[in-house]
């Protein structure tokens, strides 16, 4: 039998290309090993180790730069868009882990497994964001999902945690089935799972109108829709968000969404232009439903975590508006918004984590009464993040939404843009409710004393706030980076 | 291509689908697990028809021999589960049926209306090819799958291990409350 | 000095927010330090506005001519969608900038009596001032919209936290109405952006001056139906702010619940933003639709005048009465603008300036009596004239100014509105003139019930107006009297711009 020919150069290039992923996975294994050696009181070092690992991964991604590196015979590519999403995901992971410095002590998540799972999930996200083959995307999706299922159910003693984890796991497994079935059908029609090859085949119309291929794309879309919780595939979201330890909820909102949208964007931007008339209608309806149902359900919530869960559904709808618009403008808007959303979402969760004393009813909006003046910094930060989520200038949320709806108008989806603007006006009402409670409701006798944040926690909050303000006032360079990234994908 | 081979194919397909329906509908979880055994076996038969010898063997070894036995063990060993009459009742039959029918309609329509490029099966051993592909073209997915398994292992260990300091039993009681 | 001269509008806009940042750094408990920092941060823009007034060249028009704007600052802000940081002043914005600077400073002084959470109050107030200045100084629609929205939240908090008993209701009502207006404005903003081209670069543009050049319009903006739709979207957005009938219902609630100084700002500056927006944005961009919609606008203006006066007459709460009098007075602005004659337009702009001063006095004065008596029921007083003569004199002066007594600024403005619009809409103006009778009636009736007649013994020991309050009121009174006697300085300030605006709207495209 002939030995397999090995191309060492190609292998090394491939390893370069997945350098950030390798750093993250390596850190996860180091954390697991260190967990064995460290004494119980030294466990907080695990968190520091994770933070250092993610920081190193960010540096390595920056070192690779925006140039295009293909690796592993076209299974993965590190290009401008890959870099943008890698940095977004890693930034979200970094902020999450920094917040873990305090959170883990209070909530008993100071375990090697906790950090290892977050890191492994992060690596899955990176694979998903950079995968150019549907196989890589699928494996990335699974690698990101399975740790998250476990993390949602981390507090086994809490009924809600178990309920959320169970729902998320069952529906998630089901959606993976859809996803895989979609890939199989696409493979049946195209004979390949490589996204660029499929895209080029669509351009020369060999696949155009092939029903199996269309069914495959449809099922793939369903799989994505579950992951980014688009209506009507969103049923798991509120329960999973509410049940998960808050830190994990924050991570899910920011990073999982970014990774799923990265892969979706790659598929949509490359393959959809050819079948746009058929697909844009579907996306239009999904976006409209998601925004509307998400916002109107959020209006009824009294628990901050549930409210932010529905708000995350609504935001998925806004992002989908940009995807529906498509093209460079739409892609740029999506990239920018995903970045902005990561910061404002993590920031908001970070503050409510400090204020709420206990899981479940600790997150009731009434529990925030009187916080605003007693703890002005926390109150101010939470107001800033909520105002940004509502999309009011001069915060980054406004610029992001402006780009999304602007892209929709540019592509002729005026109705969708109008719907989006009206929706975001509705959303202001529920984002203001906690603010009203913090500043205007009469403070009860025993205002809960927020936990004193660790310095890394404070730093993470301040960094998020600075990002929300900076991206709102001076968004030019981030927008240019996003535009270049989309162009690098389309070229 | 008519004759006994067609008959065997349809028999294998019917076995798979029929057992799968039973898995979903049987109220007793142990019966369901046994029905799953037949579904897996049917799939293995289909692989044989696709001239995927390696996959068929793996299907039998891993799914029928390994995973299913694990499932049965899990069902029997969870004595708490064995005491209670475990059932998997369904809700929302009608809407679910409607959605499934629509999906079934769409997929059958596509299956029927698509001009598939039919290839005559060539019966050759595939194991070496699969091995080579895993080490070259599909090296990255292969490795990512190992990361995935690592993550799944850690997660499983995390969820099943007793919490430090709290006895498992009390934990479960609380969880069930 | 070069830096100040080159960035005078930016400084006026951002000095208050710098002050707010400084206030946030002051440790808790040092309320007096905070008050004086706020006073300084709002006094500096006032000083700069005086400098602005002297440096302003009154002979050039501005409006749609880029070269004629003064104190221009023009930089690229978000290049990928051509958003510009474009500030400039002309005869339309000058009176508003000065009014904003003056009233903000006086309102800060007037807020020295606030004891509750001084730090938050002053910081939000200064943020609000930045928003107001920015709205009046921007010439880029995106920038305008950003500043417009920046005002929204501070105002919401200022009413909702420091307001009266029904503050939450009033604040959320104010917020939802204004937000609805903003949403409409945002949609028009998007439509304008995608249907105009920058003549220099060929890309889309947010530059208001480009919008005003009709040659840059393409796509939808070619169709008259769509133009009507866009004009109406903007009109409703601005009408909510003015507030024009039937979008006025938020105003009485917001005014009654807001603290005194915030009522002053709300009535003195924020209401003017609606009519300013119409002058700056709607009229020059859609001159054809403006002509088409002139009569409905005049009718709405008259409804405001008469309906506002009648409502004011029916009020038992002094502050609510003053609030409805604002509705009535803003109707004059609308009527004068709708006439599309130079005299009417100048009259409308004059009324904006004059009403800003007069209504500020009225709200300060209501605040004075409320601080002492803790209620504002008109029938709950009586014979105060004998107890607090100085205060009575101030109130009488303000009431007479408000009802349009000759020799005070309100008279000049209203007369110009009537003169300018009489030839255009005779019947409407006759009805409006009848409205004047109601306006006079409710002022005099209230004056009689509060200050004349037998003394209510409960208030025999009412404190006289104090020096700080006089300090807030006196400058306003002096300016009202000065303009009433010699209005030329204000008229010449805006005349050339407004005449140009009328020509622009009248020119057939």
Image: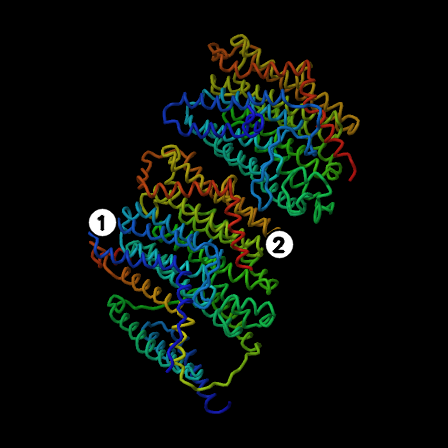
Percent coordinates x, y for residue C336 in the rendering: 71, 27
Residue toward you, C128 or C254: C128
Query: Mark 2 or mark 1, which is nearer the start of the sequence?
Result: 1
Q: Is residue A443 above or below residue A405?
A: above
Label 2 element class: loop
Residue C187 is left or right of residue C121, and the answer is right
Residue C444 seen from this side? no
Percent coordinates x, y for residue A174 in the rendering: 42, 66
Residue C238 is left or right of residue B126, and the answer is right
Q: Is residue A80 above or below residue A350?
A: below
Q: Is residue A426 above or below residue C336?
A: below
Q: CA distance from mark 1 to mark 2?
A: 56 Å
Percent coordinates x, y for residue C483 in the rendering: 66, 16
Residue shown at 38% from the left, 62% from the top: A143
From the image, tell me which residue sits under label 2: A411
Label 1 element class: helix
From the image, tell me which residue sits under label 1: A42
Q: Which image quarter: residue C437? A: top right
Percent coordinates x, y for residue B11 in the rendering: 43, 85
Residue shown at 56% from the left, 67% from the top: A200
- Disc 1 crowd rating (10 Å Cα; few below 14, some 14-19, many 20+) is few
* Mark in the foreground, 1 or 2: 1
- Disc 2 crowd rating (10 Å Cα; few below 14, some 14-19, many 20+) is some
Q: Chain of mark 1?
A: A
């Amino acid at each position: 039998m002939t030995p397999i020919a090995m191309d060492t150069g190609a292998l090394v290039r491939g390893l370069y290309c997945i350098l950030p992923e390798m750093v993250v996975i390596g850190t996860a294994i180091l954390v697991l090993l260190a967990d064995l050696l460290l004494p119980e009181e030294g466990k907080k070092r695990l968190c520091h180790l994770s933070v250092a690992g993610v920081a190193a991964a960010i540096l390595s991604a920056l070192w690779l730069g925006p140039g295009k590196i293909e690796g592993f015979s076209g299974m993965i590519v590190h290009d401008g868009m890959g870099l943008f999403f890698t940095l977004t995901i890693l930034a979200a992971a970094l902020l999450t882990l920094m917040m873990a410095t305090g959170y883990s002590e209070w909530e008993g998540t100071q375990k090697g497994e906790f950090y290892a799972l977050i890191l492994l999930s992060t690596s899955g996200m990176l694979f998903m964001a950079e995968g150019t083959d549907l196989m890589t995307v699928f494996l990335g999706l699974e690698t990101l999902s399975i740790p998250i299922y476990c993390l949602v159910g981390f507090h086994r003693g809490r009924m809600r945690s178990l309920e959320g984890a169970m729902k998320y796991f069952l529906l998630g497994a089901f959606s993976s089935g859809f996803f895989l079935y979609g890939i199989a059908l696409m493979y049946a029609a195209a004979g390949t799972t490589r996204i660029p090859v499929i895209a080029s085949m669509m351009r020369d119309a060999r696949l155009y109108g092939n029903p199996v291929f269309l069914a495959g794309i449809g099922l793939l879309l369903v799989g994505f829709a579950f992951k980014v919780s688009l209506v009507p595939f969103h049923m798991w979201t509120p329960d999973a968000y509410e049940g998960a330890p808050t830190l994990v909820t924050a991570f899910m909102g920011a990073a999982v969404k970014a990774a799923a949208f990265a892969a979706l964007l790659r598929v949509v931007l490359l393959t959809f232009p050819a079948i746009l008339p058929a697909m844009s209608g579907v996306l239009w309806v999904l976006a409209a439903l998601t925004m509307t149902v998400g916002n109107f359900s959020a209006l009824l919530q009294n628990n901050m975590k549930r409210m932010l869960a529905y708000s995350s559904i609504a935001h998925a709808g806004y992002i989908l508006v940009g995807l529906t618009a498509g093209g460079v403008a739409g892609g740029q808007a999506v990239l920018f918004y995903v970045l902005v959303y990561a910061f404002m979402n993590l920031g908001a969760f970070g503050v409510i984590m400090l204020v709420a004393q206990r899981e479940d009813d600790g997150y009731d909006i009434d529990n925030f009464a009187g916080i605003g003046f007693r703890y002005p910094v926390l109150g101010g930060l939470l107001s800033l993040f909520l105002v940004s989520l509502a999309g009011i200038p001069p915060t980054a949320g406004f610029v992001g939404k402006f780009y999304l709806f602007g892209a929709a108008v540019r592509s002729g989806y005026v109705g969708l843009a109008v719907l989006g603007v009206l929706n975001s006006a509705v959303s202001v009402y529920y984002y203001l409710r906690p603010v009203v409670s913090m500043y205007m409701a009469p403070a009860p006798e025993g205002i809960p004393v927020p936990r004193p944040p660790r310095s890394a926690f404070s730093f993470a909050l301040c960094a998020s706030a600075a990002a929300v303000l900076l991206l709102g006032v001076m968004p030019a360079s981030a927008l240019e980076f996003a535009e270049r990234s989309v162009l690098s994908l389309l070229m | 291509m008519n004759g006994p081979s067609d008959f065997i194919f349809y028999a294998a397909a019917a076995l798979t689908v029929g057992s799968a329906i039973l898995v979903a509908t049987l109220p007793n979880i142990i019966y369901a697990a046994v029905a799953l055994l037949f579904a897996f076996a049917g799939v293995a038969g289909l692989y044989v028809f696709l001239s995927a010898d390696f996959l068929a063997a793996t299907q039998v070894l891993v799914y029928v021999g390994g995973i299913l036995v694990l499932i049965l063990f899990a069902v029997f060993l969870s004595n708490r589960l064995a005491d209670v009459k475990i059932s998997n009742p369904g809700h929302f039959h009608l809407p679910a049926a409607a959605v499934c029918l629509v999906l079934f309609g769409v997929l059958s329509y596509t299956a029927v209306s698509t001009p598939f490029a039919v290839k005559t099966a060539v019966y050759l051993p595939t194991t070496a090819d699969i091995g080579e592909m895993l080490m070259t073209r599909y090296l990255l997915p292969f490795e990512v799958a190992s990361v995935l398994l690592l993550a799944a292992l850690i997660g499983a260990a995390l969820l099943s291990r007793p919490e430090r300091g709290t006895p498992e039993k009390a934990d479960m009681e609380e969880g069930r409350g | 000095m070069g830096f100040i001269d080159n960035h005078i509008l930016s400084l006026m806009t951002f000095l208050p927010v710098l002050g707010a940042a400084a206030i946030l750094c002051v440790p808790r408990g040092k309320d007096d330090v905070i008050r004086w920092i706020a006073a300084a941060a709002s006094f500096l823009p006032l000083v700069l506005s005086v400098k602005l007034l002297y440096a302003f060249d009154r002979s050039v028009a501005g409006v749609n001519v880029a070269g004629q704007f003064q104190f221009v600052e023009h930089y690229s802000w978000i290049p990928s969608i051509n958003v510009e940081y474009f500030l400039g002043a002309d005869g339309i914005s000058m009176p508003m900038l000065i009014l904003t600077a003056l009233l903000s400073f006086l309102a800060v002084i007037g807020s020295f009596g606030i004891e509750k959470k001084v730090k938050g109050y002053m910081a939000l107030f200064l943020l609000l001032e930045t928003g107001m200045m920015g709205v009046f100084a921007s010439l880029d629609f995106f920038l305008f919209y950003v500043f417009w929205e920046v005002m929204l939240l501070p105002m919401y908090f200022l009413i909702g936290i420091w307001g009266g008993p029904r503050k939450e209701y009033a604040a959320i009502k104010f917020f939802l109405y204004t937000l609805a207006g903003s949403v409409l404005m945002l949609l028009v903003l998007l439509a304008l952006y995608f249907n105009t081209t920058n003549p220099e670069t060929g890309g889309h543009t947010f530059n208001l001056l480009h919008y005003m050049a009709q040659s840059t319009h393409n796509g939808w903006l070619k169709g008259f139906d769509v133009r009507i739709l866009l004009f109406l979207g903007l009109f409703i957005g601005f009408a909510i702010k003015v507030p024009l009938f039937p979008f006025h219902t938020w105003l009485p609630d917001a005014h009654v619940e807001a603290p005194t100084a915030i009522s002053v700002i709300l009535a003195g500056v924020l209401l003017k933003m609606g009519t300013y927006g119409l002058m700056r944005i709607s009229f020059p961009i859609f001159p054809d639709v403006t002509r088409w919609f002139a009569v409905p606008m005049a009718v709405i203006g008259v409804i405001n005048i008469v309906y506002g006066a009648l409502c004011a007459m029916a009020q038992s709460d002094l502050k609510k009465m003053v609030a409805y009098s604002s509705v009535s007075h803003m109707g004059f602005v609308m009527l004068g603008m709708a006439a599309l004659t130079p005299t009417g337009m100048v009259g409308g702009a004059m009324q904006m300036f004059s009403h800003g001063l007069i209504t500020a006095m009225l709200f300060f004065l209501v605040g004075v009596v409320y601080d002492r008596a803790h209620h504002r029921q008109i029938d709950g007083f009586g014979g105060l004239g004998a107890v607090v003569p100085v205060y009575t004199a101030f109130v009488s002066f303000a009431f007479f100014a408000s009802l349009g007594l000759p020799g005070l600024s309100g008279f000049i403005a209203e007369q110009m509105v009537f003169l300018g619009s009489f030839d255009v809409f005779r019947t409407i103006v006759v009805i409006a003139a009848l409205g004047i009778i109601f306006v006079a009636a409710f002022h005099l009736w209230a004056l009689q019930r509060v200050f004349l007649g037998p003394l209510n013994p409960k208030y025999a020991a009412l404190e006289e107006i104090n020096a700080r309050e006089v300090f807030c009121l006196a400058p306003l009174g002096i300016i009202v009297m000065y303009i009433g006697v010699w209005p030329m300085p204000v008229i010449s300030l805006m005349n050339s711009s407004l005449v140009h605006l009328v020509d622009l709207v009248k020119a057939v495209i």
